[in-house]
Image (cartoon, rainbow, N blue to C red):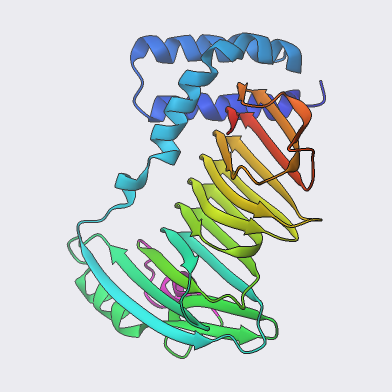
């Protein structure tokens, strides 16, 4: 029963997400009954009683988290920022965001190119605050040793993010920031955190450390080196892997949400798959090999399916 409390909590979260996603009364009642039946049971009995509803839970999670994009699309005001920064001796990109979408893609120069968009709903009484927010904001590439930090901040306040400044100076934080970052080949590590919003990364070579709380993560044409990790608390992971260097590994986790890993035919790796509540497709559950084995690809969900193709 060592995993019971975790599974119970995640099951409750999934039920709440299903309710929030607007499921019908009958489905809500069914999920609630499943939840009541599973509380206090062992992990095995939890898995047994909830397995039949895992698919519907995943659909609700997709609506509530993975497909939430429209909910964060403002029809109000926006302000665009851009910058280009030299990487110097940096080989690691660091980006943290509270709310918004983050897109990283392969660059075509030896510089980091950043476009950032601040968006906020244009509500009555908010004009002066938005004017000041937009006027005072800028985006910078901040070198710190081997790290290049990308940050939207207030002018002259590059040591703190724009939300912290706005809370202190304007008592206002109801906005989002979207980033599009072109990453040069000299950057070999990507450390990205997004509290609410999706993360996408395409065509990058190196070590991935991508983490989200609510939102999907999509990786395309990844060439992995080092020890990578990609995780989200609520949302799906879609991983397109082109190559894995010898000695590399990737740990991918989704608490509530599915994982789909699409591997190039040339990728040979060791696989470890585990799902507390969800189907595993394309490979056996547990340990297996692809193409004779190689670097480790570990995929784990608590509630959600796993597909390898």
Measured as percent of width and height from the top left, residue 280 is found at 63, 24
Instruction: Evaluate whether residue 279 shows in this view.
Output: yes
Q: Is residue 223 above or below residue 255?
A: below
Q: Is residue 132 magenta?
A: no
In depth, the one of 158 and 150 nearer the eye is 150
Measured as percent of width and height from the top left, residue 243 is found at 65, 53
**Looking at the image, which residue is at 31% across and 46% down?**
71
Q: Could you tell me which quadrant the C terminus lies in?
A: top right
In depth, the one of 189 and 196 nearer the eye is 189
Left of 247 or right of it: where is 209?
left
Measured as percent of width and height from the top left, residue 118 is found at 33, 69
**Looking at the image, which residue is at 55% across and 48% down?**
213
Q: Is residue 86 above or below residue 189?
A: below
Residue 291 picture quarter: top right
Q: Could you tell me which quadrant the N terminus lies in?
A: top right
Instruction: Evaluate whether residue 42 shows in this view.
Output: no
Left of 240 or right of it: where is 286?
right
Q: Is residue 165 magenta?
A: yes
Measured as percent of width and height from the top left, residue 45 is found at 71, 10
Q: Which residues lie in the magenta part?
A: 160-174
**Looking at the image, which residue is at 60% across and 73% down?**
93
Direction left: furthest residue: 124
In depth, the one of 59 and 13 nearer the eye is 59
**Looking at the image, which residue is at 51% across and 52% down?**
220
């Amino acid at each position: 029963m060592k995993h019971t409390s975790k599974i119970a909590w995640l099951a409750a979260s999934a039920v709440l997400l299903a309710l929030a996603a607007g499921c019908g009364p009958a489905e809500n009642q069914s999920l609630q009954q499943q939840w009541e039946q599973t509380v206090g049971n062992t992990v095995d009995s939890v898995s047994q009683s909830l397995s039949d509803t895992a698919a519907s839970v995943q659909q609700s999670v997709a609506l509530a988290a993975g497909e939430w994009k429209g909910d964060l699309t403002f029809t109000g005001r926006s302000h665009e920022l851009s910058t280009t920064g030299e990487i110097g001796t940096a080989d690691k990109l660091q980006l943290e965001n509270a709310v918004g979408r983050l897109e990283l893609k392969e660059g075509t120069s030896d510089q980091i190119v950043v476009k950032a968009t601040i968006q906020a709903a244009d509500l009555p009484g908010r004009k002066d605050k938005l004017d000041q927010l937009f006027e005072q904001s800028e985006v910078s590439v901040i070198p710190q040793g081997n790290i290049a930090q990308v940050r939207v901040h207030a002018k002259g306040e590059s040591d703190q993010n724009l939300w912290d400044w706005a809370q202190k100076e304007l008592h206002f934080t109801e906005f989002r920031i979207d980033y599009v970052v072109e990453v040069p080949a000299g950057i070999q590590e990507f450390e990205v955190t997004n509290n609410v919003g999706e993360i996408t990364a395409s065509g990058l070579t190196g070590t991935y450390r991508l983490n989200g709380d609510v939102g999907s993560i999509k990786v395309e044409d990844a060439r992995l080196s080092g020890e990578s990790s990609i995780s989200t608390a609520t949302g799906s992971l879609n991983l397109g892997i082109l190559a894995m260097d010898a000695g590399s590994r990737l740990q991918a986790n989704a608490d509530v949400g599915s994982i789909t890993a699409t591997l190039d035919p040339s990728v040979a790796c060791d696989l470890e798959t585990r799902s507390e509540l969800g189907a595993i497709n394309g490979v056996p559950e547990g340990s297996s090999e692809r193409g004779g084995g190689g670097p480790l690809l570990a995929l784990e969900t608590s509630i959600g399916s796993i597909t390898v193709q």
